[in-house]
Image (cartoon, rainbow, N blue to C red):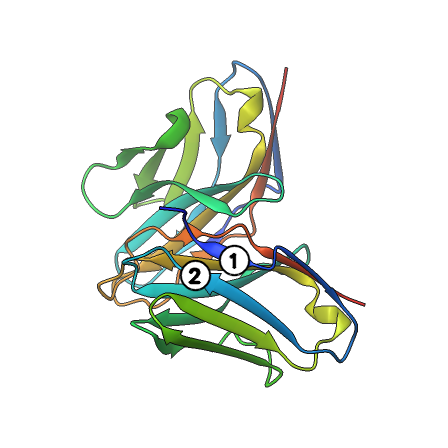
Amino acid sequence: AQSVAQPEDQVNVAEGNPLTVKCTYSVSGNPYLFWYVQYPNRGLQFLLKYITGDNLVKGSYGFEAEFNKSQTSFHLKKPSALVSDSALYFCAVSFVGGTALIFGKGTTLSVSS
Amino acid sequence: DAGVIQSPRHEVTEMGQEVTLRCKPISGHNSLFWYRQTMMRGLELLIYFNNNVPIDDSGMPEDRFSAKMPNASFSTLKIQPSEPRDSAVYFCASSLSAGDMYNEQFFGPGTRLTVL
């Protein structure tokens, strides 16, 4: 079965420190991987995606993610966190021939000043 | 473009009443998705339309839920009769799709439904 896991419900970091939000997946075949962010009382916003090519993907607001096929992971990273990065982050996966985007349960990122 | 538009933004109704949620996708997008978000179950796909045709409705909870897309610029999600357990935030999203799900989806602001 196709699935995506975000093992941490919450990640806490201090402003200025690097942040990582973890995501692992399980799909048949080659995956399409996405990160979305949701601010309070708002819809999800697209951050970045991996379809093919370079394993390091850069996205909005200074975020990046690295596709690791051997570890079936797609962790979200940022070199220096901002308080304004505090939000709910979703990893999502689809695959060739798939008809749905499968979302993880989300990780709440809290950046303290 | 105004993005995905949903209405109403908030809906409070009593158990047993009919509820209709509305969505206008981004112009030019040919795929439309309805999701439901709750604390307990997270984000769930309810139904997916491609070129106005329902492709996957396996996430629709039960017969009380129905969705239509009469044209490329409008979709509705109806719950009849509504129950308290339907209380959730309902999102509509759209994308430009050639079949595979490799294009990002654009989400509307959501409708917060409360069924008393």
Residue A72 seen anywhere in this rendered image of the structure: no
Which amino acid type corresponds to the residue marked 1 in the rendered image?
Gln
Q: Is residue A65 above or below residue A43?
A: above
Residue B14, quarter of the rendered image: bottom right
Residue A12 x %, y %: 62, 27
- Residue A49 position in % (x across, y down): 32, 43
Viewer-side residue, A4 vs B58: B58
- Mark 2 lies on residue: B24
Q: Position of residue B9 (x, y in %)?
A: 61, 55
Frontmost residue, B115 versus B48: B115
Against B116, residue A13 (above or below) is above
* Residue A96: percent from left, percent from top: 25, 62
Q: Report the amino acid beneath label 2.
A: Lys
| Residue that protrudes farthest toward the bottom in the picture | B63
Would you say the residues marked 2 and 1 are in contact, meaning their CB atoms lie under 8 Å apart?
Answer: yes
Name the chain letter of the residue that bears numbered label 2: B
Image point (48%, 30%), residue name:
A20
Q: Mark 1: few, some, or many residues within 10 Å (few <14, many ≥20)?
A: many
Q: Pointer 1: what residue?
A: B6
Indicate the quadrant containing the C terminus of chain B: top left, top right, bottom left or bottom right.
bottom right
- Chain of residue at mark 1: B
- Between the C-alphas of marks 2 and 1, the distance is 6 Å
Say whether residue A110 is visible: yes
Q: Residue at x 68, y 54 (%)?
A: B39
Is disc 2 surrounded by few (<14), some (14 to 19) or many (20+) residues within 10 Å? many
